[in-house]
Structures are given as structure tokens and as C-alpha cells.
Image (spheres, rainbow, N blue to C red):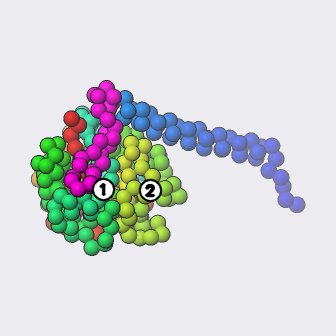
Amino acid sequence: MKKSPGILGFALCLASLAVIGAKAAAEEDCLAKAVAKQAESAQARNLSVEDSIDLGEGVILKLVYIPDGEFKMGSCDKVAFARSDERPEHKVKIARPFYMGKFEVTQDQFWQVCRSLPSMQDLPCGPADRVTWNEANEFCKIVSKMSGRRLRLPTEAEWEYACRCGSGAQFPYGTNQVEQRRLFEFAWFYNTEVRELHEAGLKRPNAWGLNDMLGNAWEWCSDWYAADYYASSPAEDPKGPESGKLRVARGGPWDYTFTSCRAAFREKANPELRLNSFGFRVVAEAR
Ligand SMILES: [Ca+2]
């Protein structure tokens, strides 16, 4: 005869649901605080959370305000699938607010600025891929000159801070837990049905309004790569080693699994690499 779970089983079930509920509430609270901080910081400087740069002929580059602050960069020992170059986890201060591209730079935008386009997949509103690190920098230089605003690639510290919304979360749903079901809402990665680049902004943005930080295209960062950099990096605005052979890329692409589509995951590549998963997004100085 099958035994009934009884009162004890029922109580354990309720306790378990309460823990899950409390955890979800804590995640929401953390992200809500990040949103409030973004709005308050922008307001204190008389700046808008949303900004843009007109690239001409109706092509607009949308920007999102990222407040200054501190966060823990890298992965702690509890993140079992983290690679050794993500350690040690360490506190980093981002001393100044900045603006970041809401989306990866699109093919339309790249063509408008550079009058060339290395992408093979026809996706005007999707990421400009097959762009080398040097070409991404050239894009920033040209837009800086034409707009009067200083554009550049993000440092990997700025990128990770913006991806985490200043929180301790590896994933945009607010935790370090691998939950593919929830990551589907935010990212195009290998486990999604259609395995290719996608138009910008079809998935949910993170709490600060940035779309496709995880998945879709890798995003070049300004830093040289060093596997042991975190052991000796500065605590404020780290900019990477003075020299190197490889540049950092972040975010995980459409053809990698969820273990790469994390805030702390570090990719590296030759700056002349031209690959159909490598794109970029820009940073603009807050005026
Ligand atoms: Ca991306």
C-alpha cells in the first residue's frame, strides 16, 4: 500500500516553496535596486538614462547610462564550471559613469560609418560580425570624430560590470545558477533552436536595458588578455595588461553553450581574427 506523505512531508514541501519564494524575491530586490541606482545616478548628473548618437540618414546608435559603482569581478570557487582565468574573484571600482551601446553595433550602423561590411549573413539590424578588433576601434574613432563624443570599446571590467548590472549575478535573471529555461528569455546561444546571429533586441534586456550582452555575438573589449591578470589587476578601473598578443572578447556567442554565456566568462582572440560570431558594442563617455 502506498504511503501518504503525511503532515511532515507537506510541511517540508511548504518550507521548500518558501525558500524558493524568498530567493526569487531577493533576486528581484537586487535588480530593482540596480534600476533605481541607474535612474538616481543619471538624475543627479542631469543626464538621461537613454541617449543616442545620430549616424546620419536615419541610422541611430542607442546608448544606455551605466552608473559608477563597485562589483565583484570574476568567479568565486563556488562556480564549479568557471575557468581558472576568471579567478580570483575580486572587488573592482568603476569610478565614472559611462554610456554603453544598448545593442551590439549593427550591420546598418557599421556600413553607415565605415562604408564597408565584412558580414556574410544579411542581417541589417543584427550584429556586424566578422569585424576585427582593429576595425571595431576604427568604427569608434570615426564616430568620435563625426559626433564630437568620445567612443571606444569597453574595458572588460566595464563590460562585466554592465552585464551584471553591478550585482553579483552571472546571469541576467539575477543569479549564478544555471537555468537554461530562464536564459532563453535573454540570450541567443547554442541551446536555442535557430543557431545563427539574430536581429538586435529580440530577447529581453538586462535590468539596465542592455540587450544581447550574453549570446548573439562575442563583443570585443579594449584589453589585452592575460590569464593571470586578476591576481594583480588594479582595484579601480582596470584596463588590462600593458601589452599582449590576444584581445579580450566577452558575452558568449550564438554557437556556444550556456557555460560561456556568463558575465564572468573571458574569451581571447587575435585582434585580426575575422569570425562570424565576433562583433562589438561601444562605450561613450558621459557628458
Ligand atoms: Ca553579445
Residue closest to the eye, 148 or 185: 148
Q: Quadrant of residue 161?
A: top left
Number of marks drawn: 2
Residue closest to the eye, 192 or 139: 139
Q: Residue at x 85, y 59 (%)?
A: 2
Task: State left or right for residue 173 relative to residue 45.
Answer: right
Which residue position holds label 1?
A: 104
Q: Residue at x 42, y 32 (%)?
A: 36
Please rate how many residues cluster around mark 1, counting C-alpha atoms within 10 Å: few if below 14, some from 14 to 19, many from 20. Answer: many
Q: Callout 1: helix, strand or loop? A: loop
Mark 1 residue type: Glu
Instruction: Give the vertical position of 265 relative to 68 (above or below).
Output: below
| Ligand 1 is within 8 Å of the C-beta of the residue at disc 1 | yes
Q: Residue at x 50, y 40 (%)?
A: 27
The picture places residue 255, in percent across and down from the top left corner, at 37, 68
Q: Quadrant of the N terminus?
A: bottom right
Task: State left or right for residue 50 relative to residue 238.
Answer: right
Residue 117 visible in the shown view: yes
Residue 159 in the magenta stretch? The answer is: no
- The magenta-colored residue range is 41-66
Residue 48 in the magenta stretch? The answer is: yes
Instruction: Give the vertical position of 218 relative to 167 (above or below).
Output: below
Q: Quadrant of residue 137?
A: bottom left
Which residue position holds label 2?
A: 203
The picture places residue 39, in percent across and down from the top left corner, at 38, 33
Mark 2 residue type: Lys
